[in-house]
Image: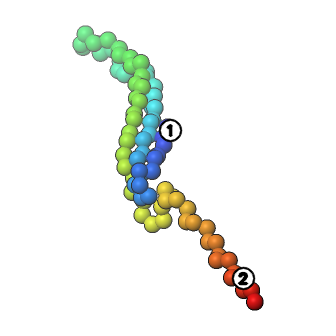
């Protein structure tokens, strides 16, 4: 499995994922004497999935830019 998300806004993300699955093959059924059906075999199944979606984040968002750092005002300089 692999995936990624991209921030569309400070709360909404576009989410894309990929998943690969393999189901092993094997013997499906035996030979039936009362019918003309022989034994069956399966070579397996390969499944590729691509999924996409939108994600909304409640609470604090990790997409929002960090707040500006606090810089105090410089002390005034008084002269006589």
Classify residue 68 as left or right of residue 55: right
Q: Nearer the viewer, mark 1 or mark 2?
A: 2
Q: Residue furthest left?
A: 35
Task: Provide residue 12's location: percent of width, then percent of height.
Answer: 40, 54
Disc 2 secondary structure class: loop
Answer above or below: position of 16 versus 55. Answer: above
Residue of label 1? 2
Against 45, residue 2 (above or below) is below
Measuring from the top left, give residue 66's x and y in whole percent.
Answer: 55, 62
- For the residue carrying disc 1, how many other residues have a C-alpha within 10 Å: few (<14), some (14-19), or many (20+)? few
User: Which residue is under mark 2?
Assistant: 77
Residue at 48% in and 43% down:
4
Q: Quadrant of residue 70?
A: bottom right
Quadrant for the C terminus, please: bottom right
Position of residue 22 in the picture relative to residue 54 (left or right): right
**Quick one: SS at disc 1?**
strand
Q: Is the residue marked by circle 2 packed among few (<14), some (14-19), or many (20+) residues within 10 Å?
A: few
């Amino acid at each position: 499995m692999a995936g990624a998300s991209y921030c569309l806004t400070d709360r909404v993300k576009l989410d894309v994922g990929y998943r690969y699955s393999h189901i092993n093959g094997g013997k499906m059924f035996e030979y039936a004497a009362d019918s003309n059906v022989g034994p069956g075999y399966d070579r397996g199944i390969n499944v590729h999935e691509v999924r996409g979606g939108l994600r909304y984040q409640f609470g604090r968002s990790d997409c929002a830019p960090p707040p500006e750092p606090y810089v105090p005002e410089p002390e005034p300089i008084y002269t006589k």
